[in-house]
Image: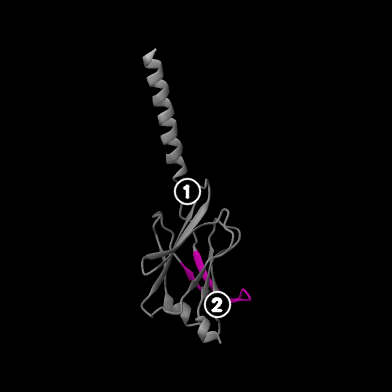
């Protein structure tokens, strides 16, 4: 009778460990996700599935040498024909960047921050949008705050 109790206890222990392990991961099946970096420091990590609002990123303290980079994973794959555009409040395209197709999942789309902040004289905020051949609509990644709140007053 003792081996049956040992098996039962081992099975319960395994089930408990497996449950804890599976709950420890952020698993969103089939979801597209993206990360935004400033000078290789990740500042945003988002999934499109279930995203409630678009994150805001202030660029008021940036310097001309800073780089903003984006990685976008579509179900674990890199899209083709990738573009990032900077749009104003009326959805007018201010600037657009195209990126080469690459099978490397960590292939960052890099933009010099100075290319974005050059628009701060005309715009206090701008939208960073992602598009590719695999997406039928453009994806609003982040809202960029180009001017500090004190400078707007």
Image position of 46 with respect to 19: above or below = below
Q: Which of 129 and 142 is in front in this view?
A: 142
Q: How many marks?
A: 2
Q: Which residue is drawn at 63% across and 76% down?
A: 90
Residue ID for mark 1:
26
Please determine whether, in this image, residue 63 is positioned above or below residue 31. below
Please provide the residue range marked out in magenta.
83-98
Q: Which tag, 1 or 2, sits closer to the chain's start?
A: 1
Q: Do the residues labelled 1 and 2 touch (CB within 8 Å)?
A: no
> For residue 124, which numbered disc appears in the image?
none
Q: Alpha carbon of mark 1 to alpha carbon of mark 2: how far?
A: 31 Å
Q: Residues within 10 Å of mark 1 (few under 14, many from 20)?
A: few
Residue 14 position within the rendered picture, expressed as x and y whole percent measured from the top left: 41, 30
Magenta-colored stretch includes residue 85:
yes
What residue occupies the far top of the structure in this picture? Answer: 1
Q: Residue 125, labelled with which disc? A: 2
Q: Determine the residue positioned at 53% across, 47% down.
A: 30
Identity of the residue drawn at 58% across and 76% down: 88
Image coords of residue 23 (percent x, y): 47, 43
């Amino acid at each position: 009778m003792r081996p049956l109790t040992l098996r039962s206890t081992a099975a319960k222990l395994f089930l408990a460990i497996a449950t804890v392990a599976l709950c420890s991961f952020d698993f969103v099946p089939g979801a597209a996700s993206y990360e935004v970096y400033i000078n290789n420091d990740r500042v945003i990590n988002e999934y499109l599935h279930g995203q409630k609002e678009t994150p805001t990123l202030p660029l008021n303290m940036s310097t001309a040498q800073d780089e903003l980079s984006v990685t976008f994973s579509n179900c674990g794959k890199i899209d083709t024909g990738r573009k990032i555009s900077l749009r104003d409040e009326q959805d007018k395209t201010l600037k657009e960047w195209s990126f080469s197709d690459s099978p490397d999942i960590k292939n960052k789309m890099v933009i010099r921050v100075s290319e974005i902040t050059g628009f701060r004289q005309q715009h206090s905020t701008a939208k960073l949008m992602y598009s590719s051949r695999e997406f039928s609509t453009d994806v609003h990644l982040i809202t960029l705050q180009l001017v500090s709140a004190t400078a707007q007053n």
